[in-house]
């Protein structure tokens, strides 16, 4: 019995030790797992933050590049349309200096210059042909547009503007009894067309500031009304412009020879010419003869200008 009691005591002691070791091991494993989880979570959070920072940097760089590209595009468009200055040139109203420049367009100090102007467009049949020729010849012209035509063909008007041509105003309707119904009606038609031009260009700050009276600003049945209307335009800071050379493409010219004959006779002896032509839907002959018009004027020593060049 004594031997049995002596041998049983170590067994109990060993069991407690083993249990203690197991508890310590489990605790250590649990602590290791917990520490590993904390470390993994910390690493995950760091990676996420680093990715977010990297993404923000990329977005900032992208936005900066986009802004630079947009600014460069705007600057290039400005340089194309008006020597980078059309933002001030097309603000309303014209300054006294700008009004005077239009008034003195028919005179120049020795320089022979030609302003090609086209009335009654834009049209889908003729205007694109004229634009293609002008682009090929590297010439900037001036288009006196009708509100009704702008309303029908806004994309062509925008093309004119984007190619650097000056967009001027030729009334809304071109119907004499409407345009000259009273002293204010011409300016009212001007304003209506200005709004349509701005809508077509997507630019509410654009103002043509130049009006061409249907039938010209002088003479005719409505001359007394024109006299009063011109006063209103001047008060509003809007210039008006006629012509001193023409092809008669809207008044009797039936062939290329007729157009060239009229051009030669009306430009003779003049240093600064404003040439009246038309890009209305039925003026295909004008587009067909335009290369000959350009060649002749170049042979005579003329340099081609548009209104951006003088205002």
Image (spheres, grey):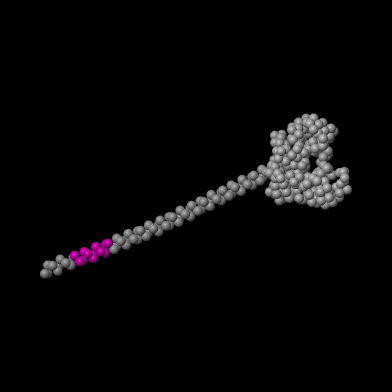
Main SS, magenta region, reads helix
Q: Where is residue 118 in the image (x, y as percent from the top left)?
A: 77, 39
**Residue 270 sits in quarter:** top right
Quick check: is 13 in the magenta stretch?
yes
Q: Where is residue 30 in the image (x, y as percent from the top left)?
A: 34, 61
Q: Which is nearer the eye, 283 or 82?
A: 283
- Residue plotted at (51% across, 51% down): 54
Quadrant where the C terminus sits is top right
**Residue 267 sits in quarter:** top right
- Residue plotted at (35% across, 58% down): 33
Please indicate whether residue 34 sits to the left or right of residue 299 in the image: left
- The magenta segment: 11-22
Please indicate whether residue 9 sits to the left or right of residue 78 in the image: left
- Residue plotted at (77% across, 41% down): 119
Q: Is residue 188 visible?
A: yes
Q: Can residue 260 be seen in this view?
A: no
**Residue 104 sits in quarter:** top right
Quick check: is 192 in the magenta stretch?
no
Image vertical order of residue 236 relative to residue 304, above or below: below
Q: Position of residue 232 (x, y in %)?
A: 83, 51
Q: Which is nearer the eye, 263 or 37?
A: 263
Quadrant where the N terminus sits is bottom left
- Residue plotted at (71% across, 38% down): 125
Image vertical order of residue 64 relative to residue 33, above or below: above
Q: Position of residue 34 (x, y in %)?
A: 37, 60
């Amino acid at each position: 019995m004594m031997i049995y009691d002596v041998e049983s005591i170590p067994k109990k002691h060993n069991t407690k030790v083993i249990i203690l070791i197991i508890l310590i091991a489990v605790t250590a494993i649990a602590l290791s797992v917990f520490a590993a989880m904390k470390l993994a979570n910390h690493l995950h959070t760091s990676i996420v933050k680093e990715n977010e920072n990297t993404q923000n940097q990329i977005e900032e760089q992208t936005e900066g590049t986009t802004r630079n590209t947009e600014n460069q595009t705007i600057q290039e468009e400005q340089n194309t349309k008006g020597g980078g200055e059309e933002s001030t040139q097309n603000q309303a109203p014209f300054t006294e200096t700008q009004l005077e420049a239009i008034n003195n367009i028919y005179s120049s100090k020795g320089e022979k210059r030609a302003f090609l102007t086209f009335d009654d467009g834009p049209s889908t049949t003729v205007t694109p042909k004229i634009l293609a020729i002008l682009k090929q010849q590297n010439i900037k012209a001036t288009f006196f547009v009708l509100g009704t035509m702008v309303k029908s063909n806004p994309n062509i008007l925008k093309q004119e503007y984007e190619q650097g041509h000056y967009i001027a105003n030729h009334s809304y309707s071109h119907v004499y009894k409407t345009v000259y119904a009273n002293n204010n009606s011409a300016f009212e038609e001007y304003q209506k067309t200005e709004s349509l031009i701005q809508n077509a260009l997507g630019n509410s700050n654009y103002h043509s500031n130049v009006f061409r009276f249907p039938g010209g600003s002088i003479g005719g049945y409505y001359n007394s009304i024109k006299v009063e209307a011109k006063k209103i335009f001047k008060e509003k800071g809007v210039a008006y412009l006629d012509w001193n050379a023409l092809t008669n493409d809207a008044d009797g010219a039936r062939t290329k020879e007729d157009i060239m004959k009229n051009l030669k006779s009306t430009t003779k002896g003049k240093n600064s010419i404003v040439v009246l032509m038309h890009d209305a839907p039925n003026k295909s002959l004008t587009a067909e003869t335009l290369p000959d018009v350009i060649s002749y004027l170049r042979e005579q020593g003329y340099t081609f200008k548009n209104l951006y060049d003088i205002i």
